[in-house]
Image (cartoon, helix red, strand yellow):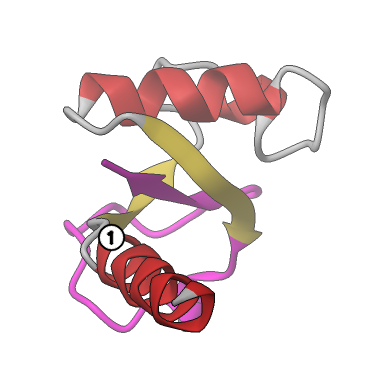
Amino acid sequence: MRLVLACLSLVLLLTVAAGAETRIFIVDSDDGYGVNRCLATGASCGVAVASAYCRSQAFAEARSFRKVALTDVTASLPEKPSCRGTCNDLVAIECTR
C-alpha cells in the first residue's frame, strides 16, 4: 500500500513539475528595469530586478538570469544602429508561472 501511494505521489509531482510554464526573455541592458546595473554586472540586486521583470510579464518568479552574447541569440531581434564604441549587453531572464 505504501509503495502504491509513493508511486502515485511521484507521478503527481512529475506531472505538476512538467506543467510549469517557463519562458526566456532576452532583455537589452538599457531597458529601464535596472538590468544594466544589476543583472549585466552581476550585482547583488539582480534577483530582485529579474523577479520584477518576470512579474511585469505576468510570470510568478525568475528561475535564472545571465548575460548572453548577441551570437547566442537565435531568434530575430529588433534592428539597432551599429555599435560605436560600446554596445549594450543582453541578459536572458528565465521566468516561471
Residue at left 51%, top 36%? 29
Quadrant where the image shows the N terminus: bottom left
Q: What secondary structure is found at the residue carrying circle 1?
A: helix
Any part of residue 87 in sight: no
**In terms of depth relative to the viewer, which is nearer, 49 or 10?**
10
Q: Viewed as shown, does residue 73 lie left or right of 43?
A: left
- Residue, disc 1: 16
Image: 36 above or below 49: below
Quadrant where the image shows the C terminus: top left
Which residues make up the magenta segment?
68-97
Instruction: Report the number of discs.
Output: 1
* Residue type pointed to by label 1: Val
Q: Does the magenta stretch include residue 13?
A: no
Residue at left 20%, top 30%? 57
Q: Where is residue 42 in the image (x, y as percent from the top left)?
A: 80, 37
Image: 50 above or below 33: below
Q: Where is residue 84 in the image (x, y as percent from the top left)?
A: 54, 51
**In terms of depth relative to the viewer, which is nearer, 33 or 80?**
33
**In terms of depth relative to the viewer, which is nearer, 90 or 88?**
90
Q: Viewed as shown, does residue 19 lie left or right of 31?
A: left
Image: 53 above or below 66: above
Q: Viewed as shown, does residue 28 lie left or right of 69?
A: left
Res. 39 image quadrant: top right
Disc 1 residue crowd, few under 14, some 14–19, many 20+, Cα 10 Å: few
Q: Where is residue 59 in the image (x, y as percent from the top left)?
A: 25, 33
Q: Does the magenta stretch include residue 90?
A: yes
Main secondary structure along the magenta-highlighted residues:
loop
Any part of residue 12 in sight: yes
Q: Viewed as shown, does residue 67 lie left or right of 53?
A: right
Residue at left 42%, top 81%? 7
Res. 61 image quadrant: top left
